[in-house]
Image (cartoon, rainbow, N blue to C red):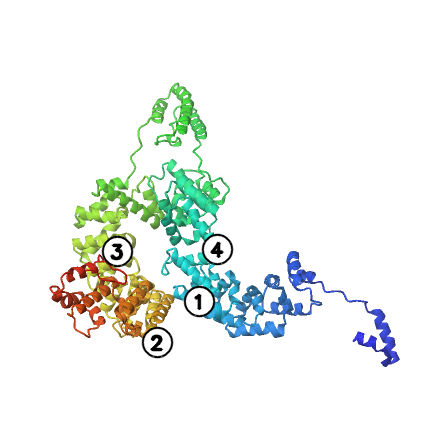
Amino acid sequence: MLSFLLRTPSHLPASCISSLRLLSTAAPTSPKPFAVEDYLVVNCGLTRAQSLKASRYLSHLKSPTKPDAVLAFLDGLGLPRSDIAAVVASDPLILCASVEKTLAPRISELGKLGLSRAQIARLTSVARFSFRSGSLARNLSFWLSVFGNSFETLEKAHRMNSGILTVHIEKVAMPNVSFLQQCGISACEVAGLNMYSSRLLSLRPDSLREAVERVEELGVERGSPMFRHALVVVATMHKEDLARKMELFLKIGFSQDQVLVIVRKAPRVLRLTEEKIRRVMHFLTTDVGLEAPYIAQRPVLFMYSLEWRLLPRHWLLNVLREKELLNVEIDYYYTSSVAEKIFVERFVHPYKDYIPGLADDYASRCSGKAPNRMGKMNFSGLVVQTAEKIRGIVGTAAGSPCNLALLPIYRRRPSAAAATAMLRLRNHLLPLVHAASQLTSPFHHGGWRLLLSTSPAPTPFSLEDYLVAACGLAPAQARSASKKALSEASTASKKAFKEFSTSGLNPRFDPDAVLALLSGVGLSRADIADIVAADPLLLLSRADRLEPRLLALRDRVGLSVPQVSRFLLVGGSRALRRSGDVSLKLEFLVSVYGSFEQLLVVMKRTNNILNVNLDRVIKPNVALLRQCGLTVRDIAQLCSRTAWLLTFNPERVKEFVLRADELGVPRSSGIFKNAVSAVANITKEKVAAKLELLKSTLGCSESEVATAVSKRPNILGIADKYLLRKIQFLVNEVGMEPQYIVERLSLLTYSLEKRLVPRHHVMKVLQEKRLLTSGLSFFSVASLGEETFKLKFIDCHKDSVPGLEDAYATARAGVASLIGTYHFVF
């Protein structure tokens, strides 16, 4: 307006012109320019370095009007000042956005998706420039549906890969999600795998397919638990880097097959630096003394920190062995892989009173404050310390007895360095002994004789020797059982582990009493030997506690001596040790499974069934299955196939029942138990992938596949590669139409090598000899029981076709040649 007035003074009254002159003389000659950098620091909370970088995108701003409005809008969302600063630093152009036309509509769209105000605020702080995109709501809606409407999963995936909110949905996201599902990987699994995994979702589809092919070339199958990890590694590494890393493993001592084993078991080792791989390999082979085949089977060793884990633990175990506090062989992988808390509880705390400063030294080495070198014992210092102790003893009153516990005792053959140090120790001791001989007290003469005596210490308890001498085990059996006891004790309790890892034996435990108790129940020496070999920790049981539990099997449950023996042999002894009296549980389970013999079959598959709570777990699960219409016989059949089902949390069993309902199997149907068993062994995502595989391979609709699977739910448990091979054989060799297979899905449940192929070629031979009735379908032949098939098609024609019976038997045994496309060789 001012410029307009200055341009048109002739059209204004005199009073206005005079006022205008006053106004023009009072106003500044030019407005102060907008300082963007200062604004970003003062108003937005950016650092000087951040503001300098961000100001390059905002040099066109002439006033703070829009930035003020945006900051007020972000503040109104509930974003703290630090988050606002992060938003502006990552996307400076947001300060130029229109609140009315851009930002407010985005908030409205996100609210319609069901996001809370707090979730919108969190998304705003991490979405960066994609927050201003008009496709944000559409992309967000797609990913929420993929991640099961879990905003937390979406947020986790976006944190690792901000590109998922801007990637093209139809051309990239949808094809990738669909292909990953075909590979047995859900988007939720990808999102939470590691910092690289969510990049799979935004790769070019052809790149993703190529990565899958490369993973399969490495021998990692799609059904393997490591497949998803291998895919992430291969998809996010250059081919040259991958090849160079695998070549490195060959150079440091592994064979080609061992390298492939390493990749299959721990594909993430390929991401480690060459320096770390070389250093860890050098340590494991040189310092620890491991061989390449052992390491190849345990490649996770490369993943552990050398300075903070491997070296400190190796140092500590060597110290314990030097002090003869660890007299058993412990698997190195166990000591390296066990969690830090458990390692400290089992290898540090029990010995800290025997070795002062052990815990602090170990902690210092783990934190990097002490050098992690496997140095030798300081014998020079030991000589001085021992001499000082002896001087103290010599200098005591004549009537004071010597405290021999202060002196170190060596039982091992010394090394050359140790021998030299011991010679120095002798030179220090002899003058002191001579001085001691001048004392008048008779106690000192006896004390020094004890001090210099070489009589051996009492023989420590050896489980291996005890198993041979008292239990009748062969030396090899005893050695194996002793290792098994140590392994189980290390995972059971700190107390049990200490019993076997030290030379002492808790006086509360009496192995002889346990053996006497087993013998008193009526078990033979051979039975006892088998039971102790299967569960050596039984010898560590308190006999007074074990006795009533053992007698209850005979007196309450009514088991005979042979039944007691078999019960203890298949895991019952562990239940008696861990769970106490199991008689009530045993009686209930026998009633469920129909017989004690059937319960033993289940226990061989999972002896954990006796360790779970009867009233809170087993009985509610049985009651739930009864509510579904299953009879006791149905439950016994179901839980015999899926033995661990009754041990699951009842809420999880309810989930299995609901998933069986989703397959369309009526609860009143006789195969409902099969549906529950099938879904209990496979995840929901893998069920969907299996249905998609059948639909795409057999060329049928989704409803047709669902109907077929509802009639044969156990097909869900068959691996994809076996399904594809069977379908290929039935279509290409037998000549079946895919629709025919869909309507007779039971064909895919039969063994290809032992049933389908041999029977098909028997039929071909009989047809060529014109010995087969025309119109006989392969489905009816494949569905016959083995004895019926042999009676109808083998026995009655073995004279007409010499060698038919032997060729069929050989083919079923897997010995016959299957040349090319399954040709039968007579």
Look at discs 4 and 3 and give the one toward the viewer.
4
Q: Residue 703 carries which label?
A: 2
User: Callout 1: few (<14), some (14-19), or many (20+) C-alpha neighbours within 10 Å?
Assistant: many
Disc 4 or disc 1, which is closer to the eye? 4
Mark 2 closeness class: few <14, some 14–19, many ≥20 residues within 10 Å: few
Residue 818 is left or right of residue 183, and the answer is left
**Label 4 element class:** loop
Helix, strand or loop at mark 2: helix
Q: Mark 4 points at which residue?
A: 238
Q: Distance between the residues labelled 4 and 2?
A: 42 Å
Q: Residue 177 carries which label?
A: 1
The percent coordinates of residue 477 (x first, y second) are 24, 44
Q: Distance between the residues labelled 1 and 2?
A: 22 Å
Q: What residue type is labelled 4?
A: His
Tell me the mark number nearer the camera, choosing from 1 and 3.
1
Tags 4 and 3 in contact by the CB under 8 Å rule?
A: no
Q: Nearer the viewer, mark 2 or mark 3?
A: 2
Q: Residue 450, percent across and down?
A: 34, 26
Q: Where is residue 630 in the image (x, y as percent from the top left)?
A: 26, 71
Which residue lies under the disc numbered 3? 581
